[in-house]
Amino acid sequence: MPGAVVDYEQVAGFLPLVLIAVVFWFLVLRPARRRQQDAAKLQESLSAGDRIMLTSGIFGSVVGMGDDSLEVEVAAGTVITVHRQAVAKIVESPVVDGPGDGHGDDSSTPEHGDESRA
């Protein structure tokens, strides 16, 4: 029976390593796989006319598509070619309720020289 005790001690010695591996899988590998799957779905769902944001922060509209590349119009008449993996997200067009840019009325803000001094 002394051999059984030694085997149990060896298994107990590896238990913390197994526990660390399981925690690492849940905290690092599993979320990374989910992000990778989400990015693949995003790249597959792209179509011409979509408004997108690239990982570099550039906004534009998809005007052409290749196997691994996209043609993105970033300004009127300016088209750049980017890799599909450079797309960070599809941007929803803002909804405009009325006149103005949606940032409120700036008429109550004093101009630089109009502030009254106390």
Image (cartoon, grey):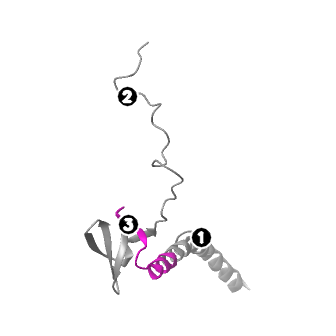
- Over which residues does the magenta segment extend? 37-60
- Which of the numbered marks, if any, corresponds to residue 23? 1
Disc on the earlier residue, 2 or 3 = 3
- Determine the image quadrant of residue 116: top left
Under mark 3, the amino acid is Thr
> Residue drawn 52% across and 70% down?
28
Callout 2–callout 3 Cβ contact below 8 Å: no
**Is 40 placed above or below 61 here?**
below
Q: Nearer the viewer, mark 2 or mark 3?
A: 2
Disc on the earlier residue, 1 or 2 = 1
Q: Position of residue 84 (x, y in %)?
A: 37, 78
Under mark 1, the amino acid is Val
> Residue drawn 56% across and 75% down?
30
Q: Secondary structure at mark 3?
A: loop
**Is 35 placed above or below 105 here?**
below
- Determine the image quadrant of residue 17: bottom right
Disc on the earlier residue, 3 or 1 = 1
